[in-house]
Amino acid sequence: SVSVTIESIEKRFDAFAALRGVSLDIQPAELVALLGPSGSGKTTLLRLIAGLEQADQGRVLFGETDMRDLSLRDRRIGFVFQHYALFRTMTVGENVAFGLKSRPRGQRPDDAEIRKRVGDLLELVQLPGLDKRYPSQLSGGQRQRVALARALAIEPRVLLLDEPFGALDARVRKDLRAWLRDLHRRTGHTTVFVTHDQEEALELADRVAILNDGRIEQVGSADDVYDHPATPFVCEFLGEVNKLPVKVVGSQAFFGDRPVLGGLSQNQGGQAALYVRPQHLRIVDDLPLALPGVVEHLRRNGPLRRAEVAVQGLAKRLDVDLASQVAPAIGEHIRLRITHGSLFAAA
Ligand code: ADP
Ligand code: MG
């Protein structure tokens, strides 16, 4: 595997700027997720890395080499798409063998070798013995695993996956996520995984790059981007969040007259927006830095119970994850402490 360096890429479609100054360093054997809403430029960036699209400015390096200086064959890119990933008229075995068979003479393994490689790859993607089947005889999840086997057959230097599990149902997608994570650990290909699903990106990737409107807003580990979002967009895109208008004085944030968060290092001063995730609000007894409110609603949110708490001076109720906390009663007056928050310039 090889490093991939994306340098100051600009890409327009006529007047429309699809990518605006995108730079990203991907380490050898790293799995990076490109995460962003539909239309943010994820596929365009992936196609640029693959050389299927030309940048107006900037360049992509494989190791030290500008990929435009490499022949298609020398780029050795494995690509898996969301849809139509397999040749329907070929068996599974023929699909996986495709890249090997289309090599120039001399580099093309003989038939026995190809058969062995196909067998090994189907074993690797946990579909042993299915080589005689046709894609129509497989489930969606099996098909995408075959597509991955086909991409891996050429021993790619870089593996590019464009929403490979996007068309599958939630359960299968979750299973394949864990499966791909393990496969990547064993095979160690430099991998770029495109998705609009934040859970998928956070669970799967060594690092996540969040794309918005043709720009990368932040790159970091799942914990970095989730707990320390660089922008309001990143914070909101990665999960639910409560927003409070605050005033920063010294190292403290005040909601009205009430200090609600201390120990702020960035001494910005003035009006700001404090973003707080539901799991970062804790019900406390009488303590400083607590926000009084009234429980107005209780509900489930997946595995967690969730309280909606009205706070005087806030139009929107605060969402509070209860986790293992004792559930309050509806109508109960409680105090909330903010255990973690992100401060942004006031909108
Ligand atoms: P994503 O994969 O994040 O959904 P894309 O990279 O497919 O986003 O597209 C980014 C933007 O560029 C979209 O607004 C899309 O309409 C536009 N776009 C992509 N490809 C083309 C093209 N070949 N011609 C014109 N516009 C395009
Ligand atoms: Mg796309």
Image (cartoon, grey):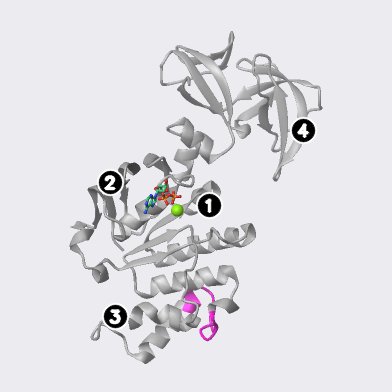
Q: Earlier in the sequence, mark 2 or mark 1?
A: 2
Is the Cβ of the residue at disc 2 closer than 8 Å to that at disc 3?
A: no
Residue 16 on image: x %, y %: 35, 42
Dot 4 corresponds to which residue? 298
Q: Say which amino acid is labelled 3.
A: Arg
Residue 295, given in percent of the width and then of the height, sits at 76, 24
Mark 3 Cα within 10 Å, few/some/many (few <14, many 20+)? few
Query: Nearer the N terminus, badge 3 or badge 4?
Result: 3
Is residue 111 part of the magenta span, yes or no? no
Can residue 34 be spotted in the picture?
yes
Left or right relative to 3: residue 283: right
Select label 3 or label 4 by which is in front: 3
The Cα–Cα distance between marks 2 and 3, rounded to whole angstroms, is 31 Å
Foreground: disc 4 or disc 2: 2
Q: What's the magenta region?
A: 122-134
Circles 3 and 1: CB atoms closer than 8 Å: no
Per the image, the residue denoted by label 1 is 200
Determine which of the numbered discs, if any, sits on residue 9 in the image.
Answer: 2
Q: Which is more N-terminal, label 2 or label 4?
A: 2
- Precedes in sequence: disc 3 or disc 1: 3
